[in-house]
Image: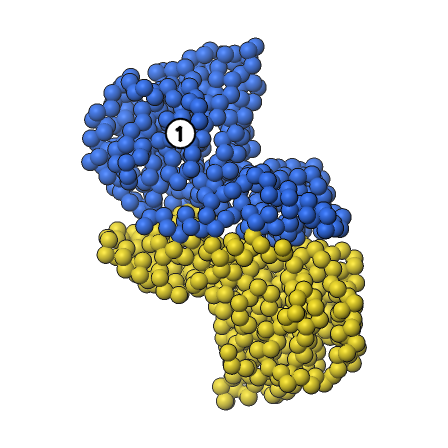
Chain colours: A blue, B yellow
């Protein structure tokens, strides 16, 4: 994997402080100047202290740094966990000589355990700004440091067209399980040197996240730690906002597809596109129901041309009484399987298509013009093996 | 497995007509006199023709016979499929010399294929009433004939106390995948020789099904064929209705636990009990969210004492803003794990508990007095293997 340069003004410090083992587990990303920032978090009723603290710190839409602890989620840890999250922000702020409220805290990993704070404090005492590591400009090092059970780091990059400003947009993300973003069940950080007013960045981010991270589901489980943040430090000057949105969307969609493809145990990317719905909400609901059906996911895994399971999954949306099986059309990779009766040749062709590493299921509800696309993966015995033996 | 005698007046004919292979696939259960009857069906928008026909035939709360075809669901089969379901009812009615509208039709198996009607017609032409097979009084033969991927037949029996009438209640059921009943994703038939007015039977059935089959979930997928029917032929005379309800509930709960334990790939029964909820609806919603979480199910499978995943699953109910993690208590088999911090000894004990073949998770939301119990199973690599290779 080639290294990806962070945008102008951003740098990173990656370290192992011994949270769980000897892999990198402590990442600080910082900007040399204030950033307009916006962030979206999990809606979980068991949201972790990191989320509680970060929600407060992003209220003013200003950030300078992000600290990420991996391998321990600091969730369901009570008052002690909240105090530890606050100490993390304060410690990073002191090292960087910035305000604690300009530090976003994120953490994923096992639930229900306190941080080893002695190790964290020892590391914070040694942290020096500006960062001096050889990899301080490398987004890949940051993406690697925030991984838990990811099999590889995820980065994405987009540049604005020459006439729209010189900014670049760089994203990193992690997350392979407990992923049904609502907001995203993962960590995703998008950095840009574009200059953009905070309220515009907020509008762009909400719109992009809805179409990307919030359209991702690996296993329907929603993390207690989900955080997606976008920081713009302005080092590259003003840009065309429509082009910036396009670049941010390209980065987020790229990361979304990488997250889906690297879902725990996943062997292929599954994309479900629904159109002809009453509205976009209905399209998204039906698309997610198909994407999340264990029977659809296992059929895709086994390249079993059992398209009836897609019909079954659509049928599960029983409150959508305007869905009429007589109006529905189902296709795989553009080849219709329902209602047109398909023969053995077409079934064999479908089986061949399902052996590919990306499977697209298209559903037309035949009601109106609502449409939505969602991203996920197949369900394999690998998923079970990974998750039946995680803490132990 | 010991044989279970059908209630007085009921008999069964079990045959192989070659729907898919040479196992029994065609079951007719009939009463020698009219029955008060009630039935509940899947809410799927892709409900099969069997459901469409049976819904119509139970409107008058009278039935005499049930015909079940296994290994082919007759779903997503269009006008031809509907005509075939009607022909099935008519053919059985002709053989038994009863009205087609007194025949309930049920069918489960692969979706999207027409019945082999030539084989079905040949069998119907030979069907004679009264039934003469050696196993004509055997509920176990009926339960075996309706199986698809079940690993064993499911029957349950209850008798009323001596002073409440002499009736017995016998139930049979099938279903191991595509099971999140709403109504039940399965077939379940309960027969009794009790005499009970149709409207009382209906009331009793709705109440019992809510607490049993509709509290069952194997994999969150909802079948297109779900049917639960209760037939009472009155041969044993009048009974105490409260005792009858208790007997029907005992039979349905027994079948529900059997269905959960035999979930595809399941190695253990998982029971989730929620109390302290705002109301019963909230308790059921939270209980199902925990029961259906793939991460909870895989942890239970692997005997991984990762109780944080239960906290995560409760947290997913993000619209339930009255859920406060500070008020929540979580226990396994009566031993509290949250909020009380638990040590290594307790974790080892929990791991030992999880190795048992029945796991109970108890959640107290600490809000009010709503309570509900739901039944399911663990998620294993066996589930994936079974479902990645079903039609092929």
Relative to A272, is A166 on the left or the right? Answer: left
Q: Position of residue A271 (x, y in %)?
A: 59, 39
The crowding category of the residue bearing disc 1, from other C-alpha atoms within 10 Å (few below 14, some 14 to 19, many at least 20), is many
| Residue at point 61%, 58% (across, down) | B223
Residue occupied by mark 1: A143
Relative to residue A250, is residue B204 depicted above or below? Answer: below
State whether residue A363 appears in this view: no
Nearer to the camera, A343 or A325: A343
Relative to residue B22, is residue B236 depicted above or below? Answer: below
| Residue at point 66%, 76% (across, down) | B14
Nearer to the camera, B377 or B35: B377
Relative to B230, is B271 on the left or the right? Answer: left
State whether residue B388 appears in this view: yes
Q: Position of residue B13 (x, y in %)?
A: 67, 79
Relative to B135, is B276 on the left or the right? Answer: left
Relative to residue A331, is residue B372 depicted above or below? Answer: below
Nearer to the camera, A375 or A90: A375
| Residue at point 53%, 70% (across, down) | B152
């Amino acid at each position: 994997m080639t290294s990806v340069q962070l945008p102008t003004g951003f740098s990173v410090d990656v370290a192992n402080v011994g949270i769980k083992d000897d892999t990198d587990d402590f990442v600080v990303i910082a900007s040399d100047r204030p950033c307009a920032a916006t962030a979206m978090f999990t809606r979980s009723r068991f949201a972790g202290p990191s989320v509680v603290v970060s929600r407060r710190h992003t209220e003013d839409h200003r950030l300078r740094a992000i600290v990420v602890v991996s391998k321990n989620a600091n969730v369901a840890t009570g008052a002690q966990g909240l105090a530890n999250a606050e100490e993390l922000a304060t410690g990073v702020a002191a090292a960087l000589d910035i305000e604690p409220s300009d530090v976003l805290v994120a953490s994923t990993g096992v639930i229900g355990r306190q941080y080893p704070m002695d190790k964290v404090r020892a590391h914070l005492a040694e942290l020096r700004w500006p960062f001096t590591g050889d990899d301080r400009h490398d987004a890949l090092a940051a993406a690697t440091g925030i991984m838990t059970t990811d099999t590889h780091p995820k980065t994405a990059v987009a540049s604005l067209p020459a006439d729209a400003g010189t900014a670049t947009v760089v994203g990193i993300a992690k997350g392979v399980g407990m992923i049904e973003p609502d907001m995203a069940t993962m960590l995703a950080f998008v950095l840009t040197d574009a200059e953009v007013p905070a309220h515009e960045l907020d509008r762009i981010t909400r719109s992009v996240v809805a179409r990307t991270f919030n359209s991702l589901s690996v296993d329907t489980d929603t993390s207690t730690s989900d955080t997606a943040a976008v920081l713009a430090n302005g080092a590259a000057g003003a840009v065309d906002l429509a082009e910036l949105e396009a670049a941010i969307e390209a980065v987020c969609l790229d990361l979304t597809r990488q997250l889906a493809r690297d879902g725990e145990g996943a062997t292929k990317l599954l994309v479900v596109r629904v159109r002809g719905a009453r509205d976009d909400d209905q399209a998204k609901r039906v698309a997610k129901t198909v994407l999340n059906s264990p029977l659809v996911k296992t059929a895709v895994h086994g390249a079993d041309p059992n398209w009836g399971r897609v019909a079954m999954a659509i049928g599960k949306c029983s409150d959508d009484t305007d869905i009429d099986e007589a109006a529905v059309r189902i296709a795989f990779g553009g080849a219709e399987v329902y209602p047109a009766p398909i023969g053995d040749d077409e079934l064999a062709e479908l089986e061949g298509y399902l052996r590919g590493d990306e499977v697209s299921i298209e559903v037309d509800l035949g009601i109106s013009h609502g449409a939505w696309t969602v991203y996920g993966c197949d369900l394999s015995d690998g998923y079970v093996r990974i998750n039946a033996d995680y803490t132990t």
